[in-house]
Amino acid sequence: MDNPENLWAHSPQGDREAPHLLLRHLWDVAALAEAFAAKFRAGAIGRMLGLIHDAAKACLEFQRYIRDPNSRKGPPHSDPGAAAYLEELGLFSLCVQAHHGRLPNHTESAARIDQTQKKYPEVVQAAKQLQDSLQLPACPTLDFPTEALVYEHLIRMCFSALIDADRLDTERYYQPDLRQTISADLPPLLEKLEAKLAAFRPPQTEVERVRVEVQEHCRRSALEKPGFYRLAVPTGGGKTLASMLFGLTHAKAHELDRIIVAIPFTSIIEQNAAIYEGIFGPENVLEHHSNYGANEETNAEGQSHVEIRRRLAAENWDMPLIVTTNVQFFESLLSDHGSKCRKLHNIARSVVILDEVQTLPPNLLEPMLSVLDWMVQYANTSVVFCTATQPDYSRLPNVPESLRQAIPIVPEPEQLFARLNRVDYTYVGKMTHEEVAARIAGQDQALCIVNSRADSVRIFETLDDPDAFYLSTYLVPAHRKKVLAQIRERLDQNLPCRVVSTQVVEAGVDIDFPYVLRMMAPLDSIVQAGGRCNRNGRTTKGRCEIFDLIEGKTPKGSYLTGTDLTRPMLQEGESALETPETQSSYFQELFRNVATDKKVGGLGIQDLRNNFDYPKVAARTKLIDDDSVGIIVEAYDPELAEKLFEQLANGASPRLIARKFAPMTVSLRHPGSLVAERQGFLVWTGSYDGSLGVGKQTGLAPEDSVV
C-alpha cells in the first residue's frame, strides 16, 4: 500500500488540478456523518461509517485505476470495505456495502461478503491496513431497544447520514465555491408569518372568525411536547397557514430544525409552495416532488465525472421549509435506494405536517405509522395529521401507543364543522361522458372532477368549449399554476368558467365554485371536492352533485373499496357528510375492509422489515401503484431548458439544476419512445399541447392513474 497520505479518493476533473486525497475525504465524511447521525442518537456509528466507507480505495489496483482513467477499471471498494470491518460494524456494514447503490438483504449481503473475501482478498487487506491511519474508535454502545423494527430503521437512517455526507464532501471537492448547506433559522420566519396573519384582522365573516380561532388553538398547542398531533379543520378553515403557524411556533419552542409539509398532489404543492414563498421568500422554500429522471444504479462504483454528478443530483432537503409529496416522503422513509434515503437524516428534529392525511393508502398504514413512530420516539420529530376529513387511526391493529395519545390541536372540532356547513350533496345517478359534458355546458361556473386522466381528457374534448379549462398531471406544474391563476381570475370577476379536472384539483386547492360535479369516489374525496364549492361562503349553500360514470375508470384497491362503501350512503340521502362523526364511522368501516399491511406470500411489509429485507420493503412501499417516472418537458419552455442544460454542461450542480427543472416536469406511466436521456436526466421529446399538455401523446392506457 502507498503512503496513506498520498492515496486518492477522487481524480481531478475540470478546474481541479489536485486530487481529492483519501484520508482527507474519510475524515471529512466522518465529521459530517457524525453530525447528521447525532440528531437521532447515533453519532458514533455515523463517524465509523464515514471513516470506513471508502477505505478499500487504498488498494494498489484501485489507486492505479483512479490515477489513469484509460486503464482497466479498478476493483470494487464498497463490499471489500464492509468485509474488512464486518466485526466492528455488524449489521451497519450494510451501509458501507450500499453507499453507491441500494441496501441489500441479509442473504445478498452475506453472499457478497463471502464472494469478496474470495475474489478480492488483497482489496480487503488494504482496507484493513488503513485502520491505524483512520484511528478507528471502539464499537459504540447504542441506546436503543433491541427490537428488529427499531434497528431496521436505524440502519436506514445511518445509511442516510453516510450517503449525504459522502455526496456533500465529493460535491465540495468538485465545486468548492458552492454553498451546500442552508441554515434553517426558523424564528424570523415565524415573525413573517405572524405579520401576514395580522393583516387579516379583525375578521369580518364567519369563515374568517373560524380561521382566527384555529390559529389561536395552533399557537397554544404548539407549546406542548414533541409528538403526534391532530389538526381537524373544515375545508376553507385556513389550515394551510394555521398548520404552518403551529409548525414554526413548535419548532421555536423546541429548537427544531425545519418544517416538512407532505401533500398528496403536486397541484397543492405548487399552490402551497407559492403561498409560502410569498411569505418567507423563495430562498427558504424547497418544492420537491420528483426524481427528475436522475437515477443511481445499484453498486455504481464507477469514477466517471458524469456518474458522480448524476449521484450528486439527489436532493437532501437542506432547506428550512420543504414542500413535498406523500409519495416522495414515505417511499423515501422505507426505501433501500441511496438517492432516496439521502434526505432522511434531515427529517430528524423537524415538524412534519401531513396535509390531507386521509389520502394515505390504507394498505400501507401499519408500516407508515410505524416508521413515523420511530421518528417521533428516537429522532425528536413531531408529526401533525392535518385534514378536514380526519381518519381515526387509534383503533388500527398494532398502532403505536404514542399515536393513540395524539394531541388534538382543536379541542372540539365538531363546532367548527357545524358553523362552516356550506354545501348540499346530492346523488344524481348514472351518466355517460357526453351527458356529463352537457351538464357542465349548462352552467356558467362549474367544476367537474373525475377519477382518471383518460376520462378527464374524453369529457374535456366532448365539451369542446374554447373557453373551458383542463387540469391534470398531464400539464407541467408551471402550466397548471397559470391555469389555476386564470380560473381564479374568472371566478373573482364572476365570468363564465367551466373546468374539467382529475382529483389533482381536489384537496386543498383554493378555488371557489358555486357548482361542483363529482364522479362517485370515496367519502373523503367527495367531501374534499365539496371543499371547492362555496368555499368562501358567497351563497347560502353550494351544490355538489355526485354521479356514477358509465364506462368510467375507478382505481382498484382501497379507492374502489371506499367508493363502494360511499355509494349507498349517498343513494340513501345521507346529507351530513362533512361531520367528524360521519367521517370517523366511514374510516372505521374502511379499515375493517382493507388490510392495513397487506400480505403477499404470507408476509406483510412489517414482516419484511423484521427480516431486514430492504429491497422487498422498498418494492412493496408504493403509494401509487404504477411505474411513473419524472420527465422534463423541454417543449414547454425550450429556451429555459437549453439554458439549464448549458449551465449543467458548464459545471453547475445537478442538484440545483434539478430544482430549477421541477416546474417543467411531469410524471408519466407510458412515455415509450417519446423519452430520451440527456445529461443524466429523462426528457420528453414530443410536443406540448396548450390545453392538454402531454396527455394525447401517451396512449391514455385504461389503467391510467388517478391524477
Image (tube, helix red, strand yellow):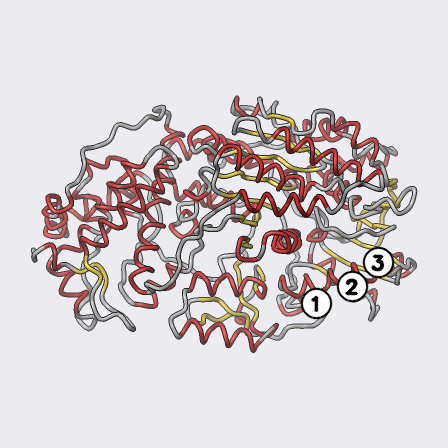
Q: Residue 42: name its quadrant.
A: top left
Residue at (55%, 55%) from the top-left corner? 287
Disc 2, SS: helix
**What residue did someone put label 2 on?**
460
- Dot 2 or dot 1: first in sequence order is 2
Mark 2 vs 3: CB contact within 8 A = no
For marks 1 and 3, give the CA distance.
24 Å
**Given the image, on which type of amino acid does mark 3 rest?**
Asp
**What residue did someone put label 3 on?**
492
Nearer the observer, disc 1 or disc 3? Answer: 3
Q: Residue 222: name its quadrant.
A: top right
Q: Residue 250: name its quadrant.
A: top right
**Given the image, on which type of amino acid does mark 2 rest?**
Phe
Can residue 603 be seen? no
Mark 2 vs 1: CB contact within 8 A = yes
Residue at (26%, 41%) from the top-left corner? 47
Depth check, front residue: 561 or 317: 317
Depth check, front residue: 479 or 18: 18
**Given the image, on which type of amino acid does mark 1 rest?**
Leu
Depth check, front residue: 502 or 235: 235
**What residue did someone put label 1 on?**
692
